């Protein structure tokens, strides 16, 4: 055993962290030539193989495998995921493949045991049903209606040959009019002060796309697993990987900030005191209607065979077919925004967990605001109580279940698809683990309302303190996240790190609204970024299928490098925002227009702020 430890240390020192000490072990991921297998009429089998030592005298290779199991930055090399081609005529496929692997690994002193075997999968969703035809009819009819509305609006911009009411409704679907709306930047004082929120949303959405680009590689069959295992040896890569798990906190912060700021503006107007229940009800109802149209489009696309048949390859059943089944089966929980807790391992369009958590926190916040409206003097106490509660709950859960303080995007979590696990839910996608940031956002919105007219002198010391808070707090969080701690420390950190990260972003926005930042302010308020910030919601909805398409259709293990990730990210971001722009024009804006026409609005709120609606 001492010799194997010396061998491992020697290899690590020689490689300076840039090579793979497990390179002599069997490949974790392997895919036979799928096209050739299909053309030869053979059968393609996906198998999971467990490796074990052949006897009491364990080989050097098994000791390396044991080292990989103990190393939380490495894959467990005792489990292989292979897709192999074999003859259809073979009897006892599992025994045949098992014997083949035993023979292959005999010289390694390893025994191969087939854990799972899936051969000759035939999809049972090849035929269109009634829903598929109805969805196709709806999409075709809707596109025709959009084109008619656009043509009519272009020809009858000022006058109408149709009835006034019908013309008003038809105009809401015009691409020309909605494009003009997209280009418009409100000139109100509130929007101009807070427009950095839109710019930061855009940049944050880019980072989220990068996060999912990275996940689309490590969540599938990986060619060069050493790239992922060596990430901790590279400070920049390690920092970026830590950053990915905190990005969504920015959205929670902004959502709560805008809600609180708008709501307390209403509370300040004593004329609204007699309409408390109506305003609270309308606030929720309008927000639900704001979100649900794109969710319906997403579920419809995910649950129809027309999209399903775009996906081909050996892993269609594991990704595309599975998503189709989840959307057909659990569409209602997604529409109810409870799918981050109810049956979360089978939720339709997994990344929309954020919308569920955000909606639940929105409802909780409305309740808090309603009570605060009645007992105005106690607002700070209510916000403080629930912020502390948001710190305590994830800390207690982390301690009870002995969890890490963050969900680490390490090799095993990716390989085992733990993104749909209890661990992921408890540390990342649950409502309670994001509650502290949301409560912090409510507090920031309340504070901003009372401080927005306070002048802050632009001095060197002020700029320095603002800059170190804006960037220093998130960097501090990322630095802490690079280490492992005791059970008690993990529990404490799980509650406080996310709001600390978000606090830095909040301080940044507040400083920019007061004129601080110089070049940073210009970047955050850059007009193209502010405009593209309007596409955040639509892009968030559509990017999932675009980014993870590569994982579902691959026919060989995916090679990863900095260049490949950067190239893929640029492509994913460009395509995602392009389709996000189309969805914004065709679905999101028309739905929002009709909502404003048909559903009572909290007019005082919107007229006063004009700040873009929260995601």
Image (tube, rainbow, N blue to C red):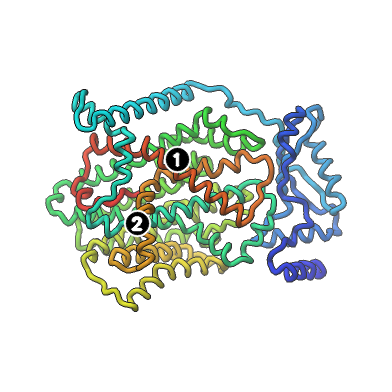
Give the left or right position of residue 531, taking residue 207 as reference.
left
Q: Nearer the viewer, mark 1 or mark 2?
A: 1
Question: Which image quarter: residue 589?
Answer: top left
User: Is residue 341 in view?
Assistant: no
> Does 271 appear above or below 137?
below
Give the CA separation, mark 1 to mark 2: 22 Å
- Seen from the viewer's position, the closer of residues 164 and 235 is 164
Give the left or right position of residue 178, taking residue 29 as reference.
left
> Does 44 appear above or below 366?
above
Give how far across and how far down residue 446 sits, in percent: 26, 61
- The residue carrying mark 1 is 579
Give how far across and how far down residue 423 sits, in percent: 54, 53
Mark 2 surroundings: few (<14), some (14-19) or many (≥20) residues within 10 A: many
> Does 354 appear above or below 579?
below
- The residue carrying mark 2 is 197
- Seen from the viewer's position, the closer of residues 176 and 103 is 176
Assign a secondary structure to mark 2.
Answer: helix
Mark 1 surroundings: few (<14), some (14-19) or many (≥20) residues within 10 A: some
Which residue occupies 19% across, 29% down? 159
Which quadrant does the N terminus fall into? bottom right
Give how far across and how far down residue 200 sits, in percent: 39, 57
Give how far across and how far down residue 114 sits, in percent: 75, 42
Hey, which residue is sitting farthest bottom in the picture?
A: 461
Assign a secondary structure to mark 1.
Answer: helix
Give the left or right position of residue 155, taking residue 559 as reference.
left
Q: Which mark is residue 314?
A: none
User: Mark 1 or mark 2: which comes first in sequence?
Assistant: 2
């Amino acid at each position: 055993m001492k010799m194997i430890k010396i061998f491992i240390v020697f290899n690590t020192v020689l490689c300076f962290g840039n090579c793979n000490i497990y390179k002599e072990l069997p490949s974790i991921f392997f895919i036979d030539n799928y096209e050739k297998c299909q053309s030869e009429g053979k059968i393609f089998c996906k198998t999971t193989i467990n490796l074990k030592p052949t006897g009491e005298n364990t080989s050097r290779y098994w000791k390396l495998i044991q080292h990989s199991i103990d190393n939380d930055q490495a894959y467990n090399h005792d489990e292989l995921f292979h897709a192999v081609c074999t003859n259809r005529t073979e009897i006892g496929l599992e025994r045949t493949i098992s014997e083949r692997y035993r023979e292959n690994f005999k010289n390694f002193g390893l025994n191969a045991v087939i854990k799972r075997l899936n051969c000759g999968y035939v999809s049972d969703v090849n035929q269109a049903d009634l829903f598929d035809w109805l969805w196709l009819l709806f999409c075709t009819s809707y596109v025709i209606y959009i084109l008619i509305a656009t043509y009519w609006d272009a020809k009858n911009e000022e006058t109408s040959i149709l009835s006034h009411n019908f013309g008003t409704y038809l105009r809401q679907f015009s691409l020309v009019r909605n494009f003009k709306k997209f280009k418009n930047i409100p000139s109100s004082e509130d929007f101009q002060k807070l427009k950095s929120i839109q710019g930061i949303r855009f940049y944050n959405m880019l980072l989220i796309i990068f996060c999912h680009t990275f996940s689309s590689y490590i969540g599938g069959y990986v060619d060069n697993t050493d790239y992922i295992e060596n990430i901790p040896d590279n400070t920049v890569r390690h920092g970026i990987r830590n950053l990915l798990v905190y990005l969504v906190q920015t959205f929670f912060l902004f959502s709560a900030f805008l809600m609180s700021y708008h709501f307390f503006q209403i509370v300040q107007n004593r004329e609204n005191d007699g309409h408390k229940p109506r305003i609270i009800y309308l606030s929720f109802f309008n927000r639900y209607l704001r979100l649900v149209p794109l969710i319906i489009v997403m579920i419809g696309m995910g649950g129809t065979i027309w999209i399903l048949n775009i996906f081909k390859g050996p892993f269609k059943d594991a990704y595309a077919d599975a998503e189709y089944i989840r959307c057909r089966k659990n569409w209602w929980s997604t529409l109810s925004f409870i799918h981050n807790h109810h049956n979360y391992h089978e939720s339709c369009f997994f990344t929309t967990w954020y919308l569920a958590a955000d909606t639940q926190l929105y409802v909780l916040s409305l309740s808090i605001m309603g009570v605060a409206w009645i007992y105005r003097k106690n607002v700070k106490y209510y916000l403080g109580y629930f912020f502390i509660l948001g710190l305590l709950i994830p800390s207690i859960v982390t301690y009870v279940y002995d969890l890490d303080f963050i969900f680490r995007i390490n090799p095993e979590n990716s390989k085992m698809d733990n993104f749909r696990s209890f661990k992921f839910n408890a540390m990342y996608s649950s409502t309670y683990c994001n509650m502290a940031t949301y409560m912090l956002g409510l507090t920031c919105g309340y504070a901003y309302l009372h401080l927005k007219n306070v002048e802050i002198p632009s001095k060197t010391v002020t700029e320095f303190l603002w800059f170190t808070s804006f960037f220093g707090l998130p960097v501090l969080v990322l630095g802490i996240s690079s280490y492992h701690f005791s059970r008690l420390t993990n529990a404490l950190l799980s509650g406080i790190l996310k709001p600390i990260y978000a606090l830095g972003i909040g301080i940044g926005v507040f400083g920019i609204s007061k004129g601080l930042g110089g070049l940073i302010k210009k970047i955050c308020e850059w007009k193209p970024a502010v405009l593209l910030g309007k596409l955040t919601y639509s892009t968030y909805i559509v990017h999932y299928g675009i980014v993870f398409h590569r994982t579902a259709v691959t026919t060989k293990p995916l090679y990863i490098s900095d260049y490949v990730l950067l190239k893929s990210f640029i492509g994913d971001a460009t395509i995602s925002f392009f389709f996000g722009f189309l969805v914004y024009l065709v679905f999101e804006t028309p739905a929002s227009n009709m909502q404003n026409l048909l559903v009572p609005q909290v007019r005082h709120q919107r007229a006063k702020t004009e700040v873009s609606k929260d995601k």
